[in-house]
Image (cartoon, rainbow, N blue to C red):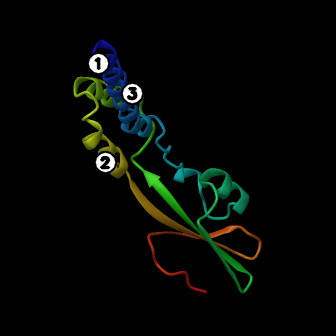
Amino acid sequence: MKFNHLIRVIGFCAICSILMSCAVGMALHGKKEPNLGAIQVGQDRSLVIMNLGQPIQTIAEEGKRIDIFELQFGNEPSAGRALGHGAMDVLTLGAWEVIGTPIEGFSGSKQKLMIEYDENDKVKTITSGTDKPRF
């Protein structure tokens, strides 16, 4: 009888440890906010990509190019948030994940940024939002 009890306790602990990793991991691996101050009109496209990463879409037409970036704000990695989630996981035996994971999943906001370049791949205009590119 004691062996069955031991197996149940080990199984319960294993399930709890699996459940406890989601919100904690999401808090630790957030995405750093982009430095939009580094992007200026007249700047080379390679510097824009170095600062913002690869665009989600590139439109090239009539010697012009438009890059569309999807940027994330308000979800930087945080050891404090991760520690808080971990403490709540321990106190609630993993039940906190039902609340903590959606909180982390919906934290932050996404915004699109369109950057239009001239024929020399220099920044011509910077537009925030989801307006359609115009040529």
Query: Residue tagged by mark 2?
Result: 102
Do the residues under discs 2 and 3 have CB atoms within 8 angstroms? Answer: no
Q: Residue furthest top?
A: 2
Specify few, some or many for label 3: CA neighbours under 10 Å numbering under 14, 14-19, or 20 or more: few
Query: Residue at image x 62%, y 54%?
Result: 53
Is 49 in front, or is 57? 57
In the depicted structure, whether residue 28 falls above or below residue 105: above
Query: Residue tagged by mark 1?
Result: 5
In the depicted structure, whether residue 19 falls above or below residue 1: below
Q: Is residue 85 visible?
A: yes
Of label 3 and label 1, which has the lower sequence position? Answer: 1
Q: Quadrant of the N terminus?
A: top left
Query: Residue tagged by mark 3?
Result: 14
Residue 110 percent coordinates (x, y):
42, 59
Badge 2 marks a residue whose secondary structure is helix
Q: Quadrant of the C terminus?
A: bottom right
Q: Is 119 displayed left or right of 117 in the figure?
A: right
Residue 34 percent coordinates (x, y):
52, 49
Q: Residue furthest left?
A: 92
Name the front one of labels 2 and 1. 1
Task: Say what amino acid the circle numbered 1 marks.
Answer: His
Residue 15 percent coordinates (x, y):
36, 32
Task: Say what amino acid the circle numbered 3 marks.
Answer: Ala
Task: Say what amino acid the circle numbered 2 marks.
Answer: Pro
Badge 3 marks a residue whose secondary structure is helix
Query: Residue at image x 45%, y 37%?
Result: 77
